[in-house]
Image (spheres, rainbow, N blue to C red):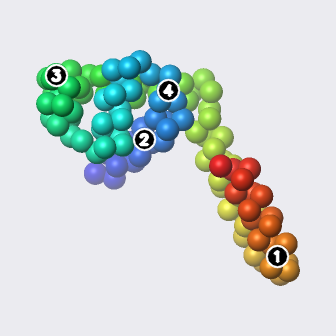
């Protein structure tokens, strides 16, 4: 169960980064599945397709997204930047810095990692 949830979350994040690179059909299925939380059967009904066709399109889209990530690494860079930002926040909090300076630094770090 946990693996399924992690797989769906990972695919959703990949879609956020690379969704515009998918073809129209893949993009539509991914949006309905990951953004609208529709089941494969609901998507099939909405698009006038079989459940199997929707499943195939979804898996094909997820495979393409993984391929983009392997080549470009945007999601892994984002995750690493977020990890470093959290570390920087921790250092700022422990440095007993004056509140306005600490807040300003944190806002800058947030802007950089968005």
Work out whether residue 40 can be spotted: yes
Q: CA distance from mark 1 to mark 2?
A: 36 Å
Q: Earlier in the sequence, mark 1 or mark 3?
A: 3
| Residue 1 versus residue 7 in the image, above or below | below
Q: What residue would you read off at disc 2?
A: 12
Q: Earlier in the sequence, mark 1 or mark 2?
A: 2
Q: Earlier in the sequence, mark 1 or mark 4?
A: 4
The picture quadrant where one finds residue 92 is bottom right
Residue 24: percent from the left, percent from the top?
38, 20
Q: CA distance from mark 1 to mark 3?
A: 57 Å
Q: What residue would you read off at disc 4?
A: 20
In this view, the residue in front, 4 or 102, is: 102
Q: Earlier in the sequence, mark 4 or mark 2?
A: 2
Q: CA distance from mark 1 to mark 4?
A: 39 Å
Residue at x 61%, y 40% (from the top left corner): 76
Q: What residue would you read off at disc 1?
A: 100
Residue at x 52%, y 30% (from the top left corner): 18
Would residue 18 be found to the left or right of residue 44 on screen? right
Residue 68: percent from the left, percent from the top?
54, 24
Q: What residue would you read off at disc 3?
A: 49
Residue 80: percent from the left, percent from the top?
66, 48
Residue at x 68%, y 62% (from the top left corner): 86
Q: Residues within 10 Å of mark 1 (few under 14, many from 20)?
A: few
In this view, the residue in front, 38 or 5, is: 38
Q: CA distance from mark 3 to mark 2?
A: 22 Å
């Amino acid at each position: 169960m946990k693996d399924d949830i992690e797989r769906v979350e990972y695919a959703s994040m990949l879609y956020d980064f690379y969704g515009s690179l998918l073809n129209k059909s893949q993009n539509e299925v991914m949006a309905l599945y990951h953004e609208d939380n529709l089941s494969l059967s609901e998507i099939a009904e909405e698009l006038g397709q079989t459940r199997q066709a929707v499943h195939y399109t979804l898996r094909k889209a997820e495979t393409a997204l993984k391929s983009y990530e392997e080549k470009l690494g945007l999601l892994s860079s984002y995750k690493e930047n977020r990890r470093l930002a959290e570390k920087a926040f921790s250092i700022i909090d422990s440095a007993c810095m004056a509140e306005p300076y600490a807040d300003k630094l944190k806002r800058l770090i947030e802007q950089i990692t968005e």
